[in-house]
Amino acid sequence: MTNHSTYTNGHAPATTNGHAPATTNDAIEQRMHRARSIVVKLEQALRTIILGQDEILAGVVQALVAGGHVLLEGAPGLGKTQIVRTLARLVGGSFARIQFTPDLMPSDVLGTSLVVTTAEGGKDLSYRPGPIFANLVLADEINRATPKTQSALLEAMAERTVSVEGKPLPLPSPFFVLATENPIEMEGVYPLPEAQLDRFLVKLIVRMPDLETLARIGARAEDPAPPSPLGSPEELVFAQGVARSIPAAPHVEQYAAKLVLATHAHRAARYGAGPRAMQALMACGRARSLAAGRAVVAVEDVAAAASSVLRHRVGMRFEAEAEGMTADTVVAQILACTAVG
């Protein structure tokens, strides 16, 4: 895409050395190359620490570049916590881990105001920030907390601010929440409501490693050393900005819209995805195109993101679940029968 600018004399500005200035395309290509190198370095470094979860690692990094939050579902011991700890060190930002329990209060997440003694001997309120004020926040076993505490976290995720005494305090940038939930725990848990699940850009399923990966994990005599930072949070913000600027053709946007609408028409769906799913599909598509080194979003980028974006936004009918169907089954069938254009 060429930028057409208007100059008072009708000519482009000359340079002192007599050469034409760098074209807009050259500048875009340089920005793309720099942003893609950030994404590639993050993924490669994660793979040296976390074995056998390449697809999950790529999904987490791309969600981070897309500027959204991730819900990780998987049994204990599959490395969910290690993923976000390692990612925080690689990005170079601040990290906070919140262990969600039934007695966790919203103030334990957002912070609280305390009565303190001033230098003059009087009393005043002083706000003590909670762990939510970090670049990367691990909300471990989020479905163990009560709905009140879940809502406090999810509101901060959506608004990216915390209200203190009526005044909004901005959360740091970048701000990324990775929440985990254990699907095999059925007692003492509070499943996230559908409206709150929609706040997560993607939901990723962490599965058991295969035989070869388990052998490689067992061959490690000790845990690998923590990685050194690969950059700074500012570099990640730069990559996010480049990803947002990647254009998409109308037929790609229409394809994404068709996928969202098809979730409502499927016979197995009790309810389908909403407009936020459309935004998520395009955001993830842009992040995937950046990771692949493409300057425009392709249909395959949107299709590749569909499962992680839509699976937690589709409610299943009881009859379909009784037949063994899942949201992933619905998304796969929609992808198979949705035409481009």
Image (cartoon, grey):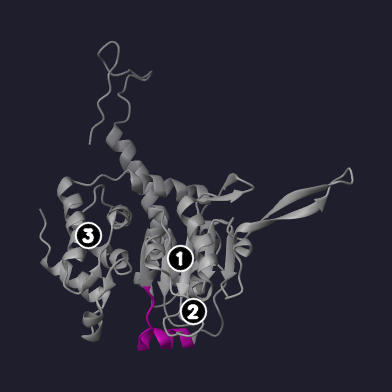
* 166 w.r.t. 313: above or below: above
Between residues 135 and 189, which one lies in front from this camera angle? 189
Query: Are the residues tagged 3 and 1 within 8 Å (C-beta)?
Result: no
Q: Secondary structure at mark 2?
A: loop
| Stretch of the chain drawn in magenta | 205-218
Q: Crowding near pointer 3: few (<14 within 10 Å), some, many (20+)?
A: many
Q: Secondary structure at mark 1?
A: helix
* Residue 156 locus on image (x, y percent): 51, 55
- Nearer mark to the viewer, of 2 and 3: 2
Between residues 11 and 195, which one lies in front from this camera angle? 195
Between residues 7 and 16, which one lies in front from this camera angle? 7
- The amino acid pointed to by label 2 is Val
Q: Residue at x 36, y 19 (%)?
A: 15
Question: Mark 3 or mark 1, which has the lower sequence index?
Answer: 1
Q: Measure how far apart labels 2 and 1 are at the Cα level.
A: 34 Å
- The amino acid pointed to by label 3 is Val
Q: Measure how far apart labels 3 and 1 are at the Cα level.
A: 34 Å
Q: Is residue 213 inside the magenta stretch?
A: yes
Residue indicated by mark 1: 45
Q: Crowding near pointer 1: few (<14 within 10 Å), some, many (20+)?
A: some
Left or right of 268 in this view: 60: right
Residue 292 in view, yes or no: no
Residue indicated by mark 3: 260
Left or right of 239 in this view: 317: left
